[in-house]
Amino acid sequence: MIEIIVTVLCALMILIGILGSIIPVLPDVILIWGATLGYGLIVGWGEWGPWLFGGISLMGLIGVAADVWVSSAGARMGGASLWSVITGIVLGIIGLFVLGPLGLFGGMAIGTFLVELIQRREPVESMRAVLGVGLGYGASFFVKFGLGMGMTLLWVIWLLVE
């Protein structure tokens, strides 16, 4: 009975982790990794569990590193400053709670644009920074979503072989 409850809870946490690759406020590959670690510790590792968890861990590490690198690379390509990225994230989080997913992207764009406009006083360059941030986060989404799905697939295989 406990195995069923733990499996269902892990599946829910993994689902939230996959949603986290889409919605930046939610945790993503780290939550998926933590859910699978909890599954192994509580339900047991079995014969293939350590190997599959090793693959899940490797994908999780790649996901975290890629998230930071790809997002910041897009922002740098657009010429965005650290303050504009931070402001964009904060306003995006506020926008998410006020207007939903559109508020997230709108808040990020407005925050980045306004800080860049204040710093540079050049609307075209400010807009280029917004596009760079958007491209970076967009590319990061695809990387994290793909790795999250791969981690989930390894966990499902783990369930099936044990």
Image: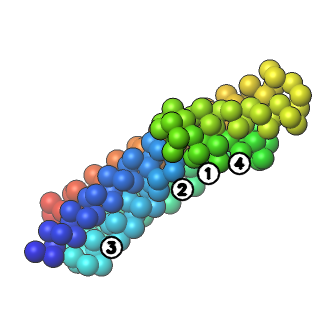
Amino acid at circle 3: Gly
Label 2, label 4: how many angstroms apart (C-alpha)? Answer: 18 Å
**Residue 14 falls in image quadrant:** bottom left
Figure quadrant of the C terminus:
bottom left
- List x then y, in percent, for residue 125: 81, 25
Amino acid at circle 4: Ile
The numbered mark at residue 137 is: none
- List x then y, in percent, for residue 29: 44, 56
Residue at the spot 54% in from the left edge and 35% down from the top edge: 103
Residue named by callout 4:
86
Residue at the spot 67% in from the left edge and 28% down from the top edge: 131
Q: Residues within 10 Å of mark 3 (few under 14, many from 20)?
A: some
Q: Are marks 1 and 2 in contact (CB under 8 Å)?
A: yes
The numbered mark at residue 68 is: 1
Q: Answer with mark 2 or mark 4, whichever residue precedes in sequence.
A: 2
Residue named by callout 3:
38
Q: Are marks 1 and 4 in contact (CB under 8 Å)?
A: no
Q: Is residue 150 visible?
A: no
